[in-house]
Image: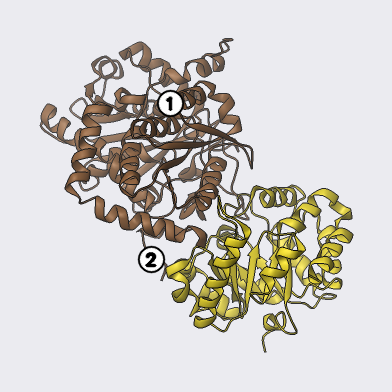
Amino acid sequence: MSKLKEAFLNGKTLAPFITCGDPNLQATAASIREAVKSGAKLIVLGIPFSDPTAEAPLLQEASIRALKGGVNTDKVFAFMKELRETVSVPVVFVTYANVVFSYGVDRFMENCDKSGVNGLMIPDLPYEERGDFLPECKKCGIELVTQLALNSDNRIEMIAKDAGEMICLTAKIAAGSTFDEALTKLKETIERIRKASGAPCLIDFDLDDADQVRKVVGLADGILISSAIVRLQAKYGDEASKYIGECVEALSKA
Amino acid sequence: MAEMTKGRFGIHGGQYVPETLMNAVNELEKAYEFFKNDEEFNRELTALFNDYAGRPSLLYYAEKMTKDLGGAKIYLKREDLNHTGAHKINNVLGQALLAKKMGKKRLIAETGAGQHGVATATAAALMNMECVVYMGKEDTERQALNVYRMRLLGAEVIPVTSGTATLKDAVSEAMREWTNRIDDSHYCLGSVMGPHPFPTIVRDFQAVISKEARQQILEKEGKLPDAVLACVGGGSNAIGSFYHFIGDEGVRLIGCEAAGRGIDTFETAATVNTGRVGIFHGMKSYFCQDEYGQIAPVYSISAGLDYPGIGPEHAHLHDIGRAQYVPVTDDEAVDAFEYLARTEGIIPAIESSHAVAHAMKLAPTMSKDQIMIVTISGRGDKDCAAIARYRGEDIHE
């Protein structure tokens, strides 16, 4: 069984998103350790990009803090290699197409493999363009995470049927809409995904309310927690790991 | 496989957008494929061009400039005479009409100098649509008068504070907003960039520039020009100026990039001259970036050319050698701004002044029986205060 699949064994998966190097690599290491200790079964680690257009400005600020702190792709790989000596949960990298492309797709995937990364998610790489990266991912055994959204509609089956070991479904409350409406749409979408694919489905939904998290997690295999973590990191900086641990623990129990 | 995907110009272009936007770009592509061949759509657009925007724009023989430089015969394609004072209106009228046909009630747009924002606000007022314009906070300060113009036209202007608070951040913010309001909003992108189908749509609406210019020069001179020059940021007036000449092999196509303080400095926006191939804002193309692919904070005196990328069709024209992209510095552009004002009584936009500057270098190297067309993409009234300050005068709008 692949390492990534381990993230989805034994109940629901809580996956914190942590921007690597925000504000420095020591803080990131501490946050990851606390998150794992508090029940995180998958770490989603962001390689900072100057202009993350798919993300909220809050996440862009985290990226910019990390870049200002001096992190770069080489340092992230070195960090990851060292992290693997003490942390064994699966890790998925999230970064933008240009970070991978600019590094050299081959070289990027080889380094992912060497440093113990299990998957890669590229928000600005839709299904149709995945051919730029997929062959190299496969060659190195790195899962290119399949991405779907609440507004994928007629695209769901086409994309889900080709999914590998993990699907990430981006959800949000549309303008002028409510959480309950989003939840209904989420339920329909997941039912359609399930019919087309057996891959575990992680939901990327910007939530920090335990009750809402429970309702969302109940529909799928896990949830990605991003803004709540990034906000704590922004607020507490070097001291954030403790608060991130508490946040993961509270939401794990939800 | 990459070559097989949609909207490619050689290796460039494509649709590198989040899944949340894929249905929106697909819907737009489908609508455009239908309406571009729709007689009624084209009739309405032509009427808007002619009766509202003031097309066709003049092709003006710059006799004094020609004699002064002592080489090629210089014609100016006067997009500065369009309604709202720039070529931007061509694209905006096309997209607003398309959006209206698609049943959208709201236009969102990014703007750098404010020209595209003003044009979008204008079209929205005309067509009774809501309009929201994203503009880097720094640019709202540099171009305060244009912010007022947009508000006067009924648009809401949202200052963008993320990233470097300039044009690229305004594009990012407009893209984000589009994902939130796909149902009722059309993203009226201002240049030949972004994901497919934008580079094609914007090119087609701007191609009216070269369609007219080709016909006008044949009428006036009985032959094609030897060179066509235009300034390039994202590249919409340039691709519009080049398009109907691409098949004419004898016509040199020259894009003039903003070199800022020089291509050997970090304060530059000359994408082809200093950038590398990358993937950003929905497209594969050339971008100013560091060794790890982080997008570089670019600089130019011209807020309209202050963008770290270039449209994918230009990237391709560069790759195959069909067009040439030359750097022009702030200093050269400011000299050209003043030169054209004094010589021809025409105040060009600081963006267009980059093309004028290169024309001033190139014309004397050409013979008197040769012809060049320089596109004056916009008028320079908006730049007067900034140029005065550049020359050390204490003038504020």
Q: Which residue occupies 72% across, 79% down?
A: A7
In the image: residue B314, left or right of residue A95:
left
Question: In front here: B166 or B64?
Answer: B166
Query: What is the quadrant of the N terminus of chain B in the image?
Result: bottom left
The reply to whether callout 1 and callout 2 are in contact (CB within 8 Å) is no
Q: Earlier in the sequence, mark 1 or mark 2?
A: 2
Spot the yellow chain and give its letter. A
Amino acid type assigned to the residue bearing label 2 in the image: Thr
Tell which tag, 1 or 2, sits nearer the viewer. 1
In the rendering, at what x and y percent does residue B147 appear? 51, 26
Q: Secondary structure at mark 1?
A: loop
Q: Residues within 10 Å of mark 1 (few under 14, many from 20)?
A: some
According to the picture, the residue beneath numbered tag 1 turns out to be B153
- Give coordinates of residue A243: x percent, y percent: 86, 58
In screen coordinates, is B173 left or right of B349?
right
Q: Which residue is mark 2?
A: B5
Q: Quadrant of the rendered structure where residue B188 is? A: top left
What chain is tagged by disc 2? B
Q: Which mark is residue B45?
A: none
Residue A97, image quadrant: bottom right
Q: Position of residue A149 (x, y in %)?
A: 54, 65
Q: Nearer the viewer, residue B188 or B248?
A: B188
Q: Is residue A251 left or right of residue A120?
A: right
Colour assignment, chain B: brown
**Residue in the image at 57% along x and 52% along y:** A53
Q: CA distance from mark 1 to mark 2?
A: 39 Å
Which residue is depicted at the point 48% across and 69% down?
A127
Residue in the image at 62% along x and 79% along y = A200
